């Protein structure tokens, strides 16, 4: 039988790419481009929707964490500098991935590119409970539910804002009110299902809009608390449980954007076993011994280098490296014979 020829490196890498789901690795964005801006303050702006693409324009690292973990700043313990530097991010979503997976993919990207490490802790803080008011709720059942809900939109009228939430549960509404009140708000209504919610209130009564009134002459509308009461709900002040996100580590400067080869190399390192030097019966061989084991790596051009010379390259199965060495030695011998003749 003839010797089996080694497959080209590109074929090996492309084949291994299909092993990613089998390996049980966290699924992330296919490609993510990050552009950093030093100047602040960061003013996050909505980006045009494109099929298969998610964009975050002029977001601070703090804003990205808030989106990824669906947590307001008031429920975080983090360094102050997270709000200083701004980023433009454009990422490609894997085909067939629903929008509900985007937050987990954003978490993965923050861990990979910014070295973000977090953990959750429990605490009791002063906040609000969202409860049903006397007379019962005055809510409209949602006309639309599913992956596209809830949808949110706001219309600004001078010093007032009209807010619409479609397909929102009471738990989701309470989390929104946490941002609007500036305090942790928990759902205590015991109301199941989703609702279409609409109300109007003054911008100055909403924490995230406070101080941004466009017209000082306009008469402000009802306060946020009055608007919630008009929905047949109340905000009751008191001690509430809080699940707080703690930022343990993060880097201001993200790692460079990855090329296709870099991305596939990471898959190989995660899927293939690492070959380590084996010890002899009386201990390890000396580094200079010709019998000493070596771990080799495949270059992008198909050549093989020792790990000592190029530790950043990906490790592969020993058979691939051995067959590649044989091919190089055979080519060298053929070249020497041609010169001799």
Image: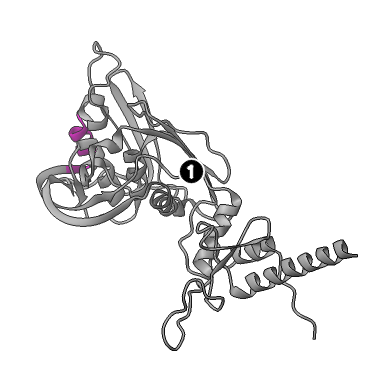
Q: Residue at x 23, y 23 (%)?
A: 221
Q: Position of residue 186 (x, y in %)?
A: 20, 50
Is 337 drawn above or below residue 228 in the view shown?
below
Q: Secondary structure at mark 1?
A: loop
Closer-to-camera residue (218/245): 245
Q: Position of residue 323 (x, y in %)?
A: 69, 72
Residue bearing mark 1:
256
**The magenta segment:** 223-234
Q: Quadrant of residue 163?
A: top left
**Does the magenta segment cover residue 233?**
yes
> What quarter of the picture does the N terminus occupy?
bottom right
Q: Residue furthest right?
A: 341
Horizontal arrangement in the rendering, residue 266 relative to residue 131 (left or right): right
Q: Residue at x 48, y 76 (%)?
A: 277
Is 45 drawn above or below residue 270 in the view shown?
above
In this orientation, does residue 126 appear?
yes
**Does the magenta segment cover residue 144?**
no
> What quarter of the picture does the C terminus occupy?
bottom right
Q: Residue at x 18, y 33 (%)?
A: 226
Q: Residue furthest top?
A: 217
Q: Position of residue 332 (x, y in %)?
A: 76, 65
């Amino acid at each position: 039988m003839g010797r089996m020829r080694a497959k080209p490196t590109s074929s090996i890498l492309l084949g291994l790419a299909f092993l990613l789901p089998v390996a049980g690795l966290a699924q992330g964005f296919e490609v993510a481009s990050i552009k950093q801006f030093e100047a602040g303050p960061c003013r996050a702006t909505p980006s045009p929707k494109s099929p298969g693409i998610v964009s975050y324009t002029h977001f601070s690292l703090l804003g990205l964490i808030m989106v990824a973990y669906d947590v307001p700043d008031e429920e975080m313990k983090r360094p102050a500098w997270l709000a200083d530097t701004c980023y433009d991010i454009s990422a490609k979503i894997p085909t067939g991935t629903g929008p509900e997976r985007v937050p987990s993919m954003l978490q993965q990207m923050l861990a990979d590119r910014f070295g973000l490490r977090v953990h959750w802790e429990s605490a009791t803080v002063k906040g609000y409970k969202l409860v049903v008011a006397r007379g019962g709720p005055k809510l409209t059942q949602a006309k639309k539910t599913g992956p596209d809900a809830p949808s949110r939109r706001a219309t600004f009228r001078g010093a007032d804002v009209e807010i619409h939430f479609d397909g929102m549960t009471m738990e989701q509404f309470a989390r929104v009110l946490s941002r609007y009140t500036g305090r942790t708000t928990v759902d205590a209504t015991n109301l199941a299902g989703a609702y279409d919610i609409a109300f109007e209130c003054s911008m100055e009564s909403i924490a995230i809009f406070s101080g941004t009134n466009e017209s000082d002459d306009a008469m402000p509308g009802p306060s946020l608390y009055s608007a919630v009461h008009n929905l047949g709900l109340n905000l009751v002040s008191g001690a509430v449980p809080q699940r707080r996100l703690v930022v343990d580590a993060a880097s201001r400067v993200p790692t460079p954007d990855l090329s296709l080869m870099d991305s596939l190399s990471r898959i190989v390192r995660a899927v293939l076993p690492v070959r380590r030097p084996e010890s002899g019966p009386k201990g390890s061989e000396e580094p200079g011994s010709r019998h000493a084991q070596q771990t080799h790596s495949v270059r992008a051009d198909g050549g093989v280098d020792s790990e000592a010379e190029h530790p950043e390259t990906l490790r592969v199965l020993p058979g691939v490296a051995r067959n590649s060495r044989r091919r190089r030695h055979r080519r060298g011998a053929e070249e020497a014979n041609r010169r001799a003749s």
